[in-house]
Structure formats: C-alpha cells, structure tokens
Image: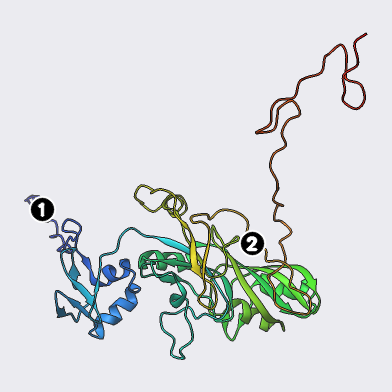
C-alpha cells in the first residue's frame, strides 16, 4: 500500500517586528540627546538612570523611551532643543585648558573659552592639560562617536619636542608597536626632524588616540615630552588657526570627507572667532578652511623660551608679492607710455634724436 504524499510543513510565523519609529519620526531618548549635543548615547542612558531626564514634565526611568519633535525634553530642568544637522568646528586648544565640561579642581576648560554664540558642543577625543593644537568639536553625538573610533583609520599627527639627543634607531620599538604595562600600542610613525639645543623635534603619527599615548610611549623609551602640538586629525588641519581660534567646517567638506547628507551650503561664514589664553577675544580669517599642510610652528626664541615648533621640511614655501606687470602693459592708474619709433630708436638717456 502506497503512503499518501506528506503535506508540506507550514512556514514558521515571523517574529514580531520591532516598532517602526521611522514613519512617526520617533527616536530613543538617548539618541535624541546625543544628536542634540547633550552627551554621548552611553552618557545619556546614565543620565536617564540617574533621574535627570524628563519628557513632557515627567521624569523617565528607562532609556527605551521614545520621543518625537512634539515632545518637550529637559535635562536637569533645562529644556533641550532637537538637534539640527551635524556640524563640525576646528579649535586651536591652548596649553592650560582642560578638555571637559566641568573640572573638579576648578581649572579653566575648553568650553569656558569658546565664543558665546557657539551652540552646545562636545569634543571629539581629548587633549590633556599640557597639550595644545587641533581639537575637533561637534554638536552631534553620533558624529563624535564615529570619528573617535580607531576603525576610521584616520592618522593624527603631532609635533613633539623631547628633551635629549636621541638617535633615530631609538624610535624603532614605537614603529613596530610597543607594549606598556600590558597594553599593546599600534605602530606609530616617528620622524626625527632636527636637534635644537638640548631638545629634539619629532613628528609623530598615531591612529588610536589612547590616553596620553604619545607621552607614555616616549617615556617608555626614556624620553620626556616637554611640548606636544596636534597638527592634524584625519583630513582636517590646524594650519595657521590662532591659539583659541574656532572655525566651522563647511557642509560641503563634511559631505565630501564624511559622506554626510548635508543641507545646501549657506553663504561663506564670518571670520574665525575665539578667545586667546586669558579670555582675550581673537578674530582671524574666514572660517571653513580645512585643506593644506599641517602648520609648522616656528623656531623657539633665544634663551630657552618656549616657542612654536620648527617648520616642516615638506611644507612648500608660500610665494609673496603681486604679479609683475608685463613690460608692454601700463601699470594700473598710469597712462601708457609712447612707444619709440621702430626705425629711429631713442638715444641714450631716453630722449629721441634730433631730426636733421
């Protein structure tokens, strides 16, 4: 007796899909706060757990809470506006400022010295108290997280001054990758630029950005860093941005370098703004410039005083002066000179010969 054909099994019921918030424009509270520039997602979740976040006047206790543009969100009683498009600024951090929103020791911070019309921003990475140079700032927590990840592969370059007269071979352990207290550091690029008195200037490139990475690596090979200047972070360059100066990166550059979906670019921005060390306001050239060689701070002054680092050997010299006016073209504002006769050239002294 032939068995009847087996019926095909019914397909398993699909698992219930997560709630689609894209149609309603809703997003989790941690993402909302991150995009608004309040904190990273992790810190935002911590704020929720601490009872510091309220939605529509009610304190929430779970980071799974979703909000829309119609909801009223506040942190520590202060209202939080929904974040706009991602923005990025270059900041020349002077020595002596802490890269944190608050300092338990009461020391001045980077954020205390930003222009008053700046929106709420976060730093991408950090520079320690005694370091200076390029610090990226953003109003978008997602962009901050993305640019801090080592997976971006972005090279961060520093001009480093160390005490001593090292030979180039001393830096081989750093170029191969060194382990310090059980912590493995990725290989660095290290160039010995020149010796200057009792100090040597180096150019160092890293891709991780661990805490005090350059200083710790130099200490591991017996060298003490007495000056450290970050001159580039990926495609963004410090160039000649003055200490304390801030300039915004144009949306077009963000779109080209980071692939962000940016709105149409407005008219060119205003001058660079910022505060120099001591709170003095500074004003410089037009904001938005990112391309170009890294700056090479100049030679320190005599007598051992601290000064900017020496110029990089691969930096092209800038041409100066205006273009020469061709000999057969009058200079602007001057009448054209009468051309001499082709058959009777002028006599020496510029006077034409007397006709006989």
| Nearest to the observer: residue 181 or residue 52 | 52
> Can you see residue 64?
no
- For disc 2, the marked residue is 295
Q: Is residue 138 left or right of residue 283?
A: left
Q: Residues within 10 Å of mark 2 (few under 14, many from 20)?
A: many
> Can you see residue 157?
yes
- For disc 1, the marked residue is 6
Quadrant of the image containing the C terminus: top right
Residue 247: x %, y % from top left: 48, 61
Circle count: 2
Q: Residue furthest top?
A: 356
Q: Secondary structure at mark 2?
A: loop
Residue 39: x %, y % from top left: 34, 74
Residue at x-position 48% and y-position 86%: 107
Residue at x-position 20% and y-position 57%: 22
Q: Quadrant of residue 14?
A: bottom left
Q: Is residue 8 left or right of residue 226?
A: left
Q: Return the mark for residue 304.
A: none
Residue 337: x %, y % from top left: 75, 24
Q: Residue furthest bottom?
A: 105
Residue 266 position (above or below residue 161):
above
Residue 219: x %, y % from top left: 67, 83
Real-space Cα distance between discs 2 and 1? Answer: 77 Å
**First in residue order: circle 2 vs circle 1:** 1
Q: Residues within 10 Å of mark 1 (few under 14, many from 20)?
A: few
Q: Quadrant of residue 19?
A: bottom left
Q: Is residue 147 left or right of residue 284?
A: left
Callouts 2 and 1 close, C-beta under 8 Å: no
């Amino acid at each position: 007796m032939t068995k009847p054909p087996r019926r095909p099994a019914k397909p398993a019921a699909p698992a219930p899909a997560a709630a689609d918030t894209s149609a309603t424009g809703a997003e989790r509270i941690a993402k909302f706060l991150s995009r608004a520039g309040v904190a990273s997602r992790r810190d935002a979740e911590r704020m929720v757990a601490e009872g510091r976040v309220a939605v529509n006047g009610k304190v929430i206790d779970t980071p799974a809470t979703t909000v829309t543009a119609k909801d009223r969100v506040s942190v520590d009683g202060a209202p939080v506006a929904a974040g706009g498009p991602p923005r990025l600024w270059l900041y020349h951090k002077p020595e002596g400022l802490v890269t944190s929103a608050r300092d338990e020791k009461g020391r001045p911070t980077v954020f205390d010295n930003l222009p008053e019309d700046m929106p709420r921003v976060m730093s991408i990475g950090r520079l320690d108290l005694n370091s200076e140079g390029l610090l990226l700032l953003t109003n978008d927590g997602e962009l901050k997280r993305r640019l801090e990840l080592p997976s971006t592969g972005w090279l961060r370059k520093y001009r480093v001054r160390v005490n001593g007269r090292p030979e180039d071979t001393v830096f081989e352990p750093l170029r191969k990758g060194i382990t310090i207290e059980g912590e493995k550091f990725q290989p660095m690029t290290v160039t010995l630029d020149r010796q200057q008195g009792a100090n040597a200037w180096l150019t160092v490139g890293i891709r991780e950005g661990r805490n005090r990475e350059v200083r710790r690596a130099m200490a591991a090979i017996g060298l003490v860093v007495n000056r450290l200047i970050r001159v580039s972070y990926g495609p963004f360059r410090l160039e000649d941005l003055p200490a304390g100066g801030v300039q915004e990166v144009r949306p077009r550059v963000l779109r080209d370098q980071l692939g962000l979906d940016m709105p149409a670019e407005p008219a060119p921005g205003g001058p660079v703004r910022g505060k120099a060390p001591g709170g003095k306001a500074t004003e410089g050239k037009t904001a938005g410039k990112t391309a170009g060689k890294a700056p090479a701070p100049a030679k320190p002054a005599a007598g051992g005083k601290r000064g900017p680092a020496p110029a990089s050997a691969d930096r092209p010299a800038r041409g100066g002066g205006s273009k020469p006016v061709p000999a057969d073209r009058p200079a602007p504002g001057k009448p054209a000179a009468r051309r001499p006769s082709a058959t009777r050239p002028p006599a020496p002294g510029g006077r034409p010969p007397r006709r006989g």
